[in-house]
Structures are given as structure tokens and as C-alpha cells.
Amino acid sequence: KQEVTQIPAALSVPEGENLVLNCSFTDSAIYNLQWFRQDPGKGLTSLLLIQSSQREQTSGRLNASLDKSSGRSTLYIAASQPGDSATYLCAVISAGNMLTFGGGTRLMVKP
Amino acid sequence: DAGVIQSPRHEVTEMGQEVTLRCKPISGHDYLFWYRQTMMRGLELLIYFNNNVPIDDSGMPEDRFSAKMPNASFSTLKIQPSEPRDSAVYFCASSRGAGNEKLFFGSGTQLSVL
């Protein structure tokens, strides 16, 4: 059974810092990995999707990398802003099209 | 497109009552998913449909839960009878395909069973 872990569970940084969020998964036989953002009381918004054959994806200040063999992904946020404060979740799709979510990292960017 | 639309946004009910949650996926999306989110267990997949057909319902907690998708633009998740431990945020999500397509979530239904 696929298990997805995110470390740290919570992170507080001053505005302007570059930061890295970590995601690990136990079964490397994945189809893709997605990073989501969730604001309080809201649904999830897909940020980046990395296909299993890809190593990274970039969108603006966000860069996600994937090392399938080691079961790891990182989300890099450059020049963090208070508006980046949210919970970030990673999820992997494995056999059977099952999307398994990590527990999330709650990010607070202080002005 | 308005995105995935869920109703109601909030539902408060008493134990034993029937609860029906509704979802309208994005037009053209073939896959529809129901998730439940709690502090203790995070996001859990309950059931998903492909072209209106239930594919995997192994995440449905017990027989009190049922889901239907009578057409491509509407799905329901029903809990009968409801129990306090069913209190959670229920999300509906849809995608154009499986595997390599982004998942789009609705705003969720906050369910409180007293």
C-alpha cells in the first residue's frame, strides 16, 4: 500500500526566504506526482504535475523535482511571500489510478 | 468554466439523519472523485467514477455510505444514517483523464453530525 509522508508538518519563515518542502513515498511505481495548495476553508488547487518520466516542473517561483527511484519529491519556493501561506500537499498516482495524499506541510510566511 | 461545484457548503445535522452531498464536475471531465478530509486521517479517497461508472469504492467506510452518478454532470454522496464520526470536510474532484491529468477540487462540504 502506497504511503506518502511530508516533512516538516509545519514551517514558519520570514518573507523573502527560499524554502524547500519535502515529500516521500514508499512505492516508486507511480504514474505521476502532484503538488497542491490548500487555503483555510477552501478546496485544493493543483500547482504542479510531474509525470513519472520527468525530473522537474516549474511554474513561476515554484519548482518541483522528482526522484522516483528514491521515492522523493521536493517543492522549492523562491523568494517566499506572505501570500504563499497555505498548506501544501503532495499526492502520487499509483496502480489503479489511486491518488494518495501526504499529510501536508502548513507554511506560514511572515512579513 | 465555473469549476467543480459542491453543495451545500455547510451541513449540520443530528445523528441518525440522512445526509446528501452534491457535486457538479467540470464539463468534459471523465473522472469524478469523492474525498473526505479530517485532521486525524488527512485526505482519504472514498470512491471514484469513470464515465459515470463507479470504478473503486474500497474507500467507502461502510454500508451507510453510498454514491451515485446518474449522468456526466451530477453526483451525490449519501450517508444514511449519519453518525458524529462522519463529521469531516467532503470534497468532490474531477479530471479529464486518469494518471497524467491534473485534479480539480470543489470547495468542499463541511459536515457536522451532532
Image (cartoon, rainbow, N blue to C red):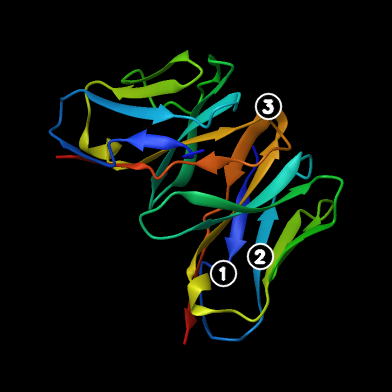
Figure label count: 3
Q: In this view of the protein, can residue A56 be seen by the observer? A: yes
Q: For the residues tagged 1 and 3, is the chain the same?
A: yes
The residue at 85%/56% (across/down) is A55
Tell me: residue A96, above or below residue A14: above
- Position of B35 relative to A14 (above/below): above
Query: Picture coordinates of residue A98 (x, y %)?
Result: 63, 33
Query: What residue sits 66% from the left and 65% below the top?
Result: A22
Q: Earlier in the sequence, mark 1 or mark 2?
A: 1
What amino acid type should be assigned to the residue bearing mark 1?
A: Pro
Q: Which residue lies at the image location 70% right of the left edge and 36% below the top edge?
A: A94
Pick the residue in front: A101 or A85.
A85
**Marks 1 and 2: same chain?**
yes
- Relative to residue B19, is residue A20 depicted above or below? below
Q: Specify whether disc 2 shares its chain with disc 3.
A: yes
Q: Which residue is mark 3?
A: A96
Identify the residue position indicated by label 1 in the image. A8
User: Dot 2: within a 10 Å radius of its alpha carbon, few (fewer than 14), some, or many (20 or more) residues?
Assistant: many
Check the residue under mark 1 and report the chain it is in: A
Q: CA distance from mark 2 to mark 3?
A: 25 Å
Q: Chain of mark 3?
A: A
Q: Label 2 is placed on what type of residue?
A: Asn
Q: Which residue is mark 2?
A: A22
Q: How far apart, in angstroms, are the residues tagged by discs 1 and 3? A: 29 Å
Labelled pair 1, 2 in contact (Cβ < 8 Å):
yes
Q: Check the image and report above or below for B60 versus A109.
A: above
